[in-house]
Amino acid sequence: MAQSVYRVDLVPAAQVDAVWPIIGPGMALACRNVESELTPHNLWADCRTGRAFLSVVTDGTQLNAAVVWRFHGETLHCVMVYGSGLLKWAAPLRDFAYRLAKAGGAKRISLDGRKAHQRLFPKARITRITYEEDVDG
């Protein structure tokens, strides 16, 4: 069986509206899974106006992942990740993120997410932890 070659592309802001119907449901699921204050609508609006960047990971036949990025000073922040098969496309996404960060003048990359997301950036250090407790618990 041939091994898939994963490609990561930046979606131009003018094309976000065409791509969003495909990735929107996945982004909604990702927002719920990480219990983020972000909504798919916020992400869509930020990407289509250029306040954030949307990248997609494909293997030539299907969309495997979508990622929203935003620059904060000297940091490229991974705002939201949606996809399946992370271990298959982590390396190409990591390479893409380094190129995007350098192109934008960033000195570091950050990511908020679940523990499994550390596989995207295995050399990353934990800089904060969020604790949460239900008030009716």
Image (cartoon, rainbow, N blue to C red):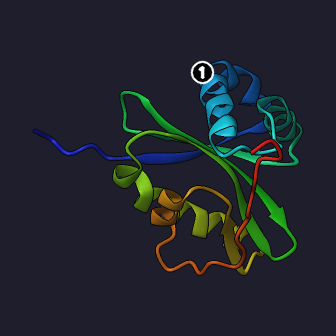
* Label 1 sits on residue: 22
- Quarter of the figure with residue 16: top right
Task: Give the position of the C terminus as an image quadrant.
Answer: top right
* Callout 1 amino acid: Ile
Q: Residue at x 63, y 56 (%)?
A: 113
Nearest the eye: 10 or 93: 93
**From the viewer's perspective, is 35 left or right of 82?**
right
- Quarter of the figure with residue 105: bottom right
**From the viewer's perspective, is 57 left or right of 47?**
left
Nearest the eye: 106 or 127: 127
> Residue 29: percent from the left, percent from the top?
62, 31
Tell me if residue 114 comes above or below residue 18 in the rendering.
Answer: below
Q: Residue at x 46, y 73 (%)?
A: 122
Nearest the eye: 137 or 16: 137
Tell me if residue 28 comes above or below residue 108 in the rendering.
Answer: above
Q: Residue at x 87, y 73 (%)?
A: 73
Task: Give the position of the N terminus as an image quadrant.
Answer: top left
> Residue 56: percent from the left, percent from the top?
56, 40
**From the viewer's perspective, is 85 left or right of 54?**
left
> Residue 22: percent from the left, percent from the top?
60, 21
> Residue 5: percent from the left, percent from the top?
31, 46
Question: Can you name the residue that lies furthest to the front here?
Answer: 137
Tell me if residue 5 comes above or below residue 62 in the rendering.
Answer: below
